[in-house]
Each structure stands twice: as structure tokens, then as C-alpha cells.
Image (cartoon, rainbow, N blue to C red):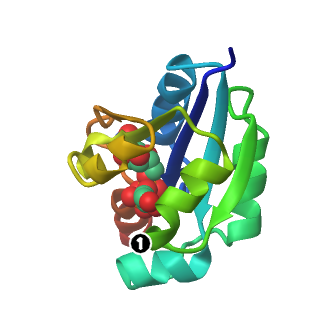
């Protein structure tokens, strides 16, 4: 049976940390679905709009060979719905979210993978600003 994986994130200013988590997420099963935070949801989470608009972030993710399907995540409160709609067997998140999604264990397996050290969208924005 096909094992379906789901993961979520903004994936703004796409970088190697994003590649690493998506590649490792795909290795947990056979089919990887990615929920990309909408521009508005990112504003709610981080009090700023992403650098890349959601249509571009979706296109970048869709072009990766280890990503099978992409949808827009409109709200953090719809996790259960997204997991069920996508028939996800496993939810994968970076360990900056460790523990935060344990309530989803009722619906699927939940795995937190270690983040890639020393890189983040916010740090890249700071570096570019300082140039
Ligand atoms: N990530 C990583 N290593 C980094 C940076 C990010 O493994 N150096 C992972 C994060 O842990 C996350 C994914 O890449 O699993 C996407 O990161 P963000 O775009 O920062 O995601 P975030 O805005 O935290 O959104 O519903 C959950 C949220 O939508 C997650």
C-alpha cells in the first residue's frame, strides 16, 4: 500500500534546509504532499508577508522531484482536515515544532526531523539587508 506523507511550511526564500527536510520527509514513505502557508497565514504567524508570494512558493515546490502534490494551507487550525483530506499516514515536521503536533497522533503517525543547522529564511533576509 502507498504510504502517504504530509508536511507543512512557508518555504519562503527557498534554501537547502527546505530541500533537506522535504527529501527526508519523502523517504518516510511513497507520496509526499506539502501544505504551503498562504501569504495571509504567514502574516498571522510571523507578522510579515513572505518575500515570495504564495503562487511562486507553490510553483517552486511543485517543481521538486521528491514533492508529489502541493496545496495552500489557509489556517493552522485545519490540520486535522488537511490530514484527513489527503489521507496522510505520517505527518513530518522540523524539530522546531517538536511536540506541537502530538495531538495529531490520533489521526496519523507524527515524526519530527532535525532542522538543518545555521540556515533560515530570516537569517538570509538579514544578510541580504546588510549588503
Ligand atoms: N526547516 C529545516 N531546517 C531549516 C529551516 C527550516 O528543517 N534550517 C524546516 C522547518 O522545520 C519546517 C520546514 O523546513 O518543517 C519549513 O520551514 P518554514 O517555512 O519556516 O515553516 P514554518 O513557517 O515554520 O511553517 O503548520 C506549520 C507551519 O505552517 C510551519
Q: What residue do we see at 34% from left, 42% from top?
A: 105
* Residue 38: % across, % down: 61, 72
In the image, 82: left or right of 77? right
* Residue 50: % across, % down: 54, 73
Q: What residue do we see at 44% from left, 37% from top?
A: 108
* Residue 65: % across, % down: 74, 27
In the image, 89: left or right of 119? right
* Residue 3: % across, % down: 61, 22
The answer, for residue 10, to whether it is visible in the render is: no
The answer, for residue 21, to whether it is visible in the render is: yes
Number of labels in the image equals 1
Q: Nearer the viewer, residue 22 or 119?
A: 22
In the image, 106: left or right of 7? left
In the image, 129: left or right of 68? left
Mark 1 Cα within 10 Å, few/some/many (few <14, many 20+)?
few
Q: Give the secondary structure at mark 1.
A: helix
Q: Residue furthest left?
A: 99
Q: Nearer the viewer, residue 16 or 20?
A: 20
The N terminus: image quadrant = top right
Judge: label 1 CB < 8 Å from ligand 1: no
Q: Quarter-wise, where is residue 5 in the image?
A: top right
What residue is disc 1 on?
A: 129
Q: What residue do we see at 36% from left, 69% from top?
A: 130
The relative height of residue 63 versus residue 100 in the rendered view (above or below) is above
The C terminus: image quadrant = bottom left
Q: Quarter-wise, where is residue 119 in the image?
A: top left
Q: What residue do we see at 59% from left, 56% from top?
A: 82
Amino acid at each position: 500500500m502507498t504510504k502517504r506523507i504530509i508536511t507543512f511550511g512557508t518555504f519562503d526564500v527557498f534554501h537547502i534546509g527546505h530541500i533537506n527536510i522535504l527529501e527526508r520527509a519523502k523517504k518516510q514513505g511513497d507520496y509526499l504532499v506539502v501544505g504551503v502557508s498562504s501569504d495571509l497565514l504567514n502574516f498571522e504567524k510571523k507578522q510579515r508577508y513572505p518575500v515570495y508570494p504564495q503562487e511562486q512558493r507553490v510553483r517552486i515546490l511543485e517543481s521538486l522531484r521528491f514533492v508529489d502534490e502541493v496545496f495552500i494551507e489557509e489556517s493552522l487550525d485545519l490540520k486535522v482536515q488537511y490530514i484527513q483530506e489527503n489521507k496522510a499516514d505520517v505527518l513530518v515536521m522540523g524539530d522546531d515544532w517538536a511536540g506541537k503536533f502530538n495531538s495529531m497522533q490520533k489521526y496519523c503517525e507524527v515524526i519530527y526531523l532535525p532542522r538543518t543547522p545555521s540556515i533560515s529564511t530570516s537569517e538570509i533576509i538579514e544578510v541580504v539587508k546588510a549588503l
